[in-house]
Amino acid sequence: AHTSWHCGRTRESGGSGAADCLALPLLLPLQLIIFTPKSLLRHPEARSSFDDMLPGTHFLRVIPDSGPAAQNPANVKRVLFCTGKVYYDLTRERKARQMEADVAITRVEQLSPFPFDLLQKEAQKYPNAELVWCQEEHKNQGYYDYVKPRLRTTINRAKPVWYAGREPAAAPATGNKKTHLTELQRLLDTAFNLDAFKDLA
């Protein structure tokens, strides 16, 4: 494991652009890269049943919301797309704010090749919702710049794809826990403030 990995390292080595059109399974039949902090390995909600890994099961490229938001999709005001550990921060905050029916959270488990087909279904499922990409990384170090144009292509540029996350920075982390938690709370406030992008539209 690399202690200061960030997604740009994968992108720079061919994780985007022309590499998306290659038939990589023919070249490397077993390729799966998972980046996760140790805290997620111990997280009680980040566990799978063995039933999820039996013969006949498969990797889920996208994991849709399965809660109250998915039951009444026309009433959903915002869809948060994310990948990785930030999902657990988002679900905890959504529950605390009692916004399970207003905000859907969709996990993008496979970023490359990009799951255009599945994300198109997700966007169409919530016709009245804003689309927001959430990431814990700084804006210039996470997947926002990679995801935004692809997600907009998926929806034929019908609406903006907003951003909820840390501001751009040169360093991958602040090095200060208090500042880190303040930045995380700002991310969550943006993600769940339904008026956050009102003046930007």
Image (cartoon, grey):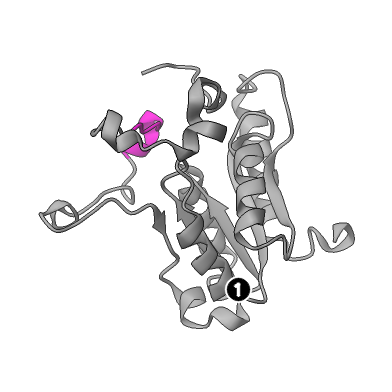
Q: Which residue lies furthest to the left in this view?
A: 55
- Give whichever of 31, 49 is nearer the camera: 31
Type of secondary structure dominating the magenta stretch: loop
> Total label count?
1
What's the residue at 49%, 30% (across, down)? 15
Which kind of residue does numbered mark 1 sit on? Answer: Asp
State the image quarter where residue 97 is shown: bottom right
Please give the range of residues in magenta. Answer: 33-42
Disc 1 designates what residue? Answer: 102
Q: In this view, does 112 lie to the left or right of 200?
A: left
Q: In which quarter of the image is the N terminus?
A: top left
Q: Residues within 10 Å of mark 1 (few under 14, many from 20)?
A: many
Quarter of the image that includes the C terminus: bottom right
Asked whether 38 falls inside the magenta stretch, the response is yes
Whole-percent x, y for residue 41 in the image:
31, 36
In the picture, residue 130 is in which quadrant?
A: bottom right
Residue 5 % position (x, y) = 49, 20
Tell whether position 188 is magenta: no
Which residue is at a point 41% across and 56% down the rendered structure image?
62
Label 1 element class? loop
Q: Residue at 51% of width from left, 67% of height from top?
A: 122
Residue 16, visible in the rendered structure? no
Q: Kindly tell me whether residue 33 is visible in this rendering.
A: yes
The x and y percentages for residue 75 are 61, 81
In the image, residue 79 above or below residue 177: below
Compared with 119, 4 (above or below) is above
Q: Nearer the viewer, residue 98 or 196?
A: 196
Which of the pair 96/105 is nearer the observer? Answer: 105
* Residue 4 drawn at (x, y percent): 50, 17
Judge from the rendering whether residue 152 lies leftward or rightward of residue 120; answer left or right.
Answer: right
In the displayed structure, does residue 134 sit left or right of residue 2?
Answer: right
